[in-house]
Every structure is written in C-alpha cells, then in structure tokens.
Amino acid sequence: MRITGVATTLLRVPLRQRTITDSQSSVDAVEFLQVQLETDAGITGYGMNWSYTPGLRAAQVLVDENYAPLLRGQDPLLRKELVRRMFFSNHFVGRVGAARVGIAAVEFALWDLACKSVGLPLWKYLGPCRETVKAYSTDGGWLSWSEADLVRDALRLVARGFDAVKIKLGRPDPREDCARVAAVRKALGPKVRIMTDVNCAWNLATARAWGAKLADLDVFWLEEPMLPEDVKGHAELARSIPVPIAVGETIYTKYAFRDYIESGAARIVQADATKLLGIDEWLEVAALASAYNLPVVPHTNVQQKLHVQLAAATPAVMMVESCYESINDIWEEPVHVRDGHYTLPQEPGVGLQLTGAVLAEFRVG
Ligand code: MG
C-alpha cells in the first residue's frame, strides 16, 4: 500500500448549545483540521485535530507544504518512521503546538489506514480489555453559570446515568468556587464523584489554600490548578493537599508526563492523543502511567470516539470524559453514552471521519 494523495480541510463547527466558559476560554464553536490520505489500495485514511480558537490554519499549512511531500509514495504502515520524518522536518518552528497538532492529525489517518487494511476498529486492532467504557460528564459545570443552573444541570446528568461530573473553577473570588462545589455536593449527596477543573488559573498559594478546602467537599480530583510548565509547583502542591491532582490536556510530550509522574506531581494522567504526537505516543504515556499504578483518564472534548477506543484497549484507563454531546452527530457513526457508559464503534478504523454534510456546511476558506 502506498500513499497517493494528501488533502486537508479546515472547518469551524458551531456548538448547538449555550456558549460555554472556563477560566481561560469562552467557546461557541470548534475548529477542525481534517486530513485525508488516499492510497493505491483504494482505502482512505481520515485524521483530524481540533482547537477552540482559530489557529489550525498554521497546522494546515504545515501538513500541506511540509508533511504531504514526505508522505506521498510512502507505505502508510511505516507510520513511526513517517512521524519521525515529519517531526524533524520542521522542529525548529514547532516542537510543540501547531507542528505537533498537524503531525497528530496525519498520525491518526495513518492508524486509520492500518486498521482498515485488516478490517478492524482501532480498539480491536490494539487488543481489547473491555467491551464498554465508563464515562464521566464534563458537559456542564461551566464557569459562567449561576449556582442554581449548575446544580440543576448536575442533577440532570445524574438522572441520565452519570455518577461522576466535573465543575469548572477559577472565578475571581475562590470563595465562590468553593460555595458552588458545596452546593453541588449538597444536591448530589455523597455517592456521586465531583471533579474540579481550574484550567491553569491559580498560582501555588491560591491552589494550596483552596485545594485544601476542596478536600472537605470530597472532591475526586483537582485538574490543572496551575500552568502546565510548572511541574515543580504541582509537586509542591501535591505534597501539601490531599486532593489528587489531574493534568494532561495541555501537556504535549511523554517527557513532560515523565517529569510529572516521577516527581509525584500528578495522580491522574489525562493524556490526550491530539496533543501528543498521536496514538503511538499516547500508548507510551499510558504504559508509563501503568508502571506507576496511576489511572489514565484521557482528556477529551470532541475526540471521544478516539479515546473511547484507546480506553477499551488500555487497562490503566479509569474512564473517559463526555463533552459537547450537542455536536456528537458531526461524526460518521458517533459513539453514545448510555447508563454512564460509552458504546464502542464497530466499523473499521480510528473513526475520525466527519460527515459529508459537516464538511460541506462548515468548511472555512
Ligand atoms: Mg480540563
């Protein structure tokens, strides 16, 4: 099998729900870069990457101008070598960020071809360890909501079958954060897991002071309390508060995960294949976490179908985030959450193919 064509499409898909907010972002649409690889075997591989804000144009240019010439004529099963070549072709302009995001989009398409060439969905290709995947909901808990809306929505999610929900923190006064978590805890009772997510808004002093108070509310984890580059700060925080710290959605390399894990700075590993160099590096991070007996809970917003498949083949995964259900139908054969668990896709491949209708309606430029 040889790659005969590389095509990219940039899309901006509006969320069909209220604008959502965390301490860093206000989101009403998601940008996608879709990568399509044609082969002489008649199989097409699809990959994608995503962003909240415009910026994937940069990744698109890198795929079109740097990576496509490296890919044409090559055997897609030589994936790890092709990723290495793409990485070093422009590592002076982006060892992380746009370059990596573009490589990951291609890497998923290469995996898609490998899975389709043997007629298996990704999770069966990798070797399954389970047939359903536990979900937790991040499709609520937004920072701009009133406390009453927060409580009402958390009750709705629990009524739907979720037993774990996440709440965004990072309001200007952390006392409000704690009061909101307390209100949700009171409404849900002691059995539902409540996770909290600061999206990097705190410094060490704030995280120490308020992280300790979250422990009294039986918070299951504190996510991204500080900037991801500050491994030392996270390690200090982990030594001073009992709430487990979760990080990963803005960590781009296995080496950064190694530093977090070895220094005791993270107890929940939220590796995201769309931020790493793709599935191969995600599997390496999951293996690293497994060797330290740490649970992996992949970060996910639009890429559930990918991470649900990785979870079904990775014993270290505890559960997978459920978010942006309002645009779940942008995918060919989307996965669904029923009774708090994800269904698994049965069609061959990685499953990152957007529908033709979405490609036609939301194409940018
Ligand atoms: Mg998060």
Image (cartoon, rainbow, N blue to C red):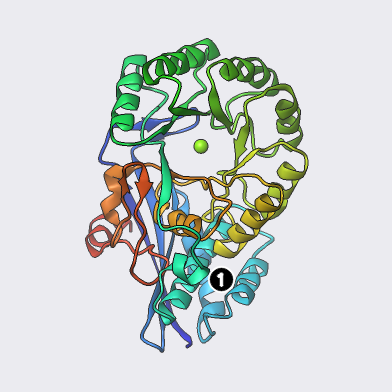
Q: List x then y, in percent, for residue 144.
A: 38, 22
Residue 49 in view here: no
Horizontally, is 86 left or right of 46 in the view? Answer: right
State whether residue 225 is above or below residue 62. Answer: above
Q: Nearer the viewer, residue 154 or 198?
A: 154
Q: Nearer the viewer, residue 298 or 42?
A: 298
Mark 1 lies within 8 Å of ligand 1 (Cβ measured): no
Dividing the image into 4 quarters, which one contains the C terminus? bottom left
State whether residue 105 is above or below residue 79. Answer: above
Q: Quadrant of residue 46?
A: bottom left
**Secondary structure state at the residue bearing disc 1:** helix
Q: Residue at x 73, y 37 (%)?
A: 231
What's the residue type where badge 1 is placed?
A: Asn
State whether residue 98 is above or below residue 221. Answer: below
Horizontally, is 279 left or right of 60 in the view? Answer: right
State whether residue 349 is above or below residue 216. Answer: below
Q: Residue at x 44, y 25 (%)?
A: 191
Q: Quadrant of residue 184?
A: top left
Horizontally, is 268 left or right of 327 in the view? Answer: right
Q: List x then y, in percent, for residue 332.
A: 28, 62
Q: List x then y, in percent, for residue 297.
A: 53, 45
Residue 200 in view here: yes
Q: How many marks?
A: 1
Mark 1, other Cα within 10 Å: few <14 / some 14–19 / many ≥20: some
Q: Kindly identify which residue carries mark 1.
A: 66
Q: Residue at x 65, y 57 (%)?
A: 287
Q: Residue at x 36, y 86 (%)?
A: 42
Q: Quadrant of residue 117?
A: bottom left
Horizontally, is 199 left or right of 309 in the view? Answer: right
